[in-house]
Amino acid sequence: MDLPMLLNYLFGGFPWEIPEIYQKKSSIYHLDRVRTATHIITGEDDVRVDADQSYILERGLNYLGIPVQLLVFPQEGHILENNPWHGKIKVREELKWLKKYGHGLQ
């Protein structure tokens, strides 16, 4: 995360100071509770949420048998703003995902 002082404020310390708090709050330690098909979108150059976290989440959900799709946009950060086609592709893929897994959505 690019805002380390925010983490320190929110959790009362840094991960190496209070690892038990971060493990309790981190979704990666609770993946066994996920039941929902998950669509993950990230930019490969995201500094707010590193793309590696998306890869880890996708691999974990896939291992657990949860339907998951990861879209990684090259040369994009947290906001898809470098290539206008990326925004269009993102929306197209979200709509396809919702059509497949958004039961009852019209």
Image (cartoon, grey):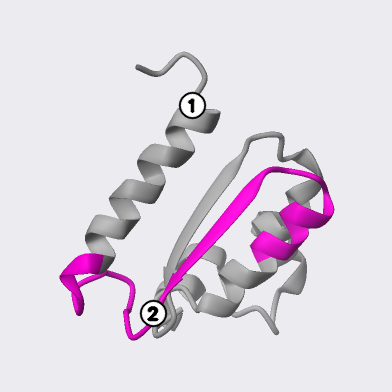
SS for callout 2: loop
| Residues shaded magenta | 57-85
Amino acid, disc 1: Gly
Q: Quick one: 4 or 80, which is closer to the camera? A: 80
| Residue at image location 40% in from the left, 49% down from the top | 93
Say above or below: 97 vs 53. Answer: above
The answer to which quarter of the image holds residue 11 is bottom right
Label 1 or label 2, whichever comes before in sequence order: 2
| Residue at image location 35% in from the left, 17% down from the top | 106
| Residue at image location 58% in from the left, 45% down from the top | 38
75 within the magenta span: yes
Say above or below: 26 vs 15. Answer: above
Choose mark 1 or mark 2, whichever is in front: 1
The answer to which quarter of the image holds residue 33 is top right
64 within the magenta span: yes
Q: Is residue 64 left or right of residue 2?
A: right
Place of residue 86 in the rendered image (x, y in percent of width and height, measured from the top left): 27, 67
Q: Which residue is mark 1?
A: 102
Q: Quick one: 11 or 73, which is closer to the camera? A: 73
Place of residue 1 in the rendered image (x, y in percent of width and height, measured from the top left): 46, 78
Can the viewer see residue 21 in this picture? no
Q: Which residue is mark 2?
A: 3
SS for callout 1: loop
| Residue at image location 59% in from the left, 80% down from the top | 14
